[in-house]
Amino acid sequence: MTAHNPPQILTLRVMRNDKIADGIHVFEFRDPDGHPLPQFSAGAHIAIEVPSGLLRKYSLCNDPAERDRYMVAVKREVNGRGGSIDLIDHVKAGDHLKVAAPVNDFELPQRAQDFLFIAGGIGITPIMAMIRQAHTQGKRFRLYYLTRSPETTAFLDELSAPEFKDNVVIHYDGGDATNSLDLKPILAERKNREHLYCCGPRPLMEAVRRMTDHWSSAAVHFEAFSDAETHKPTDKPFKVRLARSGAVIDVPADKTILEALHEHGIDVASSCETGTCGTCRTKLTTGKVDHRDLVLADHERVDNIMICVSRALTDEITIDR
Ligand code: FES
């Protein structure tokens, strides 16, 4: 079970599939009869059924005030599971695709006035919708956009627009980690009660999580797309004991604790299932954990576990369920 009702499935017309940077294409979808689309807020994603039948999630990058189109930017992931290549290589303007209406696990708090955005590579996509929404709502933001080179960087034109450019720092590392931007001074203190939103490769998000351990965890938000880092080939089976009922559940090597609980009919709320939203947070009573989330601060990891991604390091752990 998830915290969401299943989203409405729409059949939308592809209006464009255009290359906007090396290996990155932008897609635009509209209702074939010109009807308005279900509304979304910045940070929302849609799930697209690609021609092979796989369902893939992509963050919306256009202005949430637009009701007539959805736009996503897709990186052609040569080492991915094939969804992005299928979409980029086989879908053209005029095609119709099934699209699940927007869902948002990465929403901006209404009352926050100041935002710090950190985007790595294609992780810029939800951040584009966020800066557009922040601008429309008269809120303040700073954006650090970390990428390899101008050729591989999406949205350069939009980000150099007068309304954005003074708040945007684009850092090119040339593909050399020793040229990375030093984020420590940027994250040393939380200014103006800023909310931090970070989206990009897992190592970047893990580094940002470590550097913001002294921030309120409610002010630090991550968005992950891929489950590649949360399932490892070396994963082993283990047992989870439920403290309240005494039940013991087997968690196979290829399943998460959350999946194992659901298979046993145990109802646990979840949402992102990538260790970023915080919904599945559970008290840990005994056992050692391989924490794979981006939610818990170090001191919270002693007695909490995000059961959608993290696993036991011991043969058995006990959780408060
Ligand atoms: S469901 Fe989002 S962190 Fe587990």
Image (tube, helix red, strand yellow):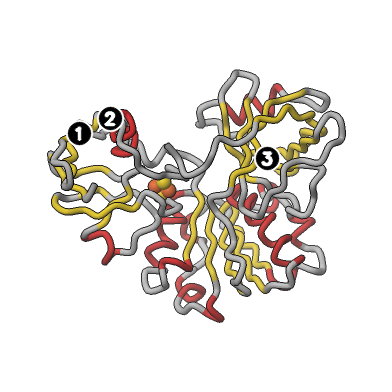
The amino acid type found where label 3 is placed reads: Ile
Task: Give the labeled residue for mark 1.
Answer: 249
Marks 3 and 1 close (CB-CB < 8 Å): no
| Left or right, 153 with reference to 208 | right
Question: Alpha carbon of mark 2 to alpha carbon of mark 1: how far?
Answer: 8 Å
Question: Alpha carbon of mark 3 to alpha carbon of mark 1: how far?
Answer: 43 Å
Is label 3 or label 2 in front? 2
Which residue sits at x=74%, y=37%?
27
Marks 2 and 1 close (CB-CB < 8 Å): yes
Closer to the chain start, of discs 3 and 1, is 3
Using the rendered view, name the quadrant where residue 111 is placed: bottom right
Is label 3 or label 1 in front? 1
Question: Alpha carbon of mark 3 to alpha carbon of mark 2: how far?
Answer: 41 Å
Which residue sits at x=79%, y=56%?
157
Closer to the chain start, of discs 3 and 2, is 3
Pinpoint residue 291: horizontal percent, then vertical percent: 29, 51
Pinpoint residue 225: horizontal percent, then vertical percent: 51, 42
Label 2, secondary structure: give it: loop
The amino acid type found where label 1 is placed reads: Ile
The amino acid type found where label 2 is placed reads: His
Which numbered tag is attached to residue 200? none
| Left or right, 203 with reference to 133 | left
Closer to the chain start, of discs 2 and 1, is 1
Q: Quadrant of the N terminus?
A: top left
Is label 2 or label 1 in front? 2
Which numbered tag is attached to residue 24? 3
Pinpoint residue 16: horizontal percent, then vertical percent: 81, 34
Which numbered tag is attached to residue 264? 2
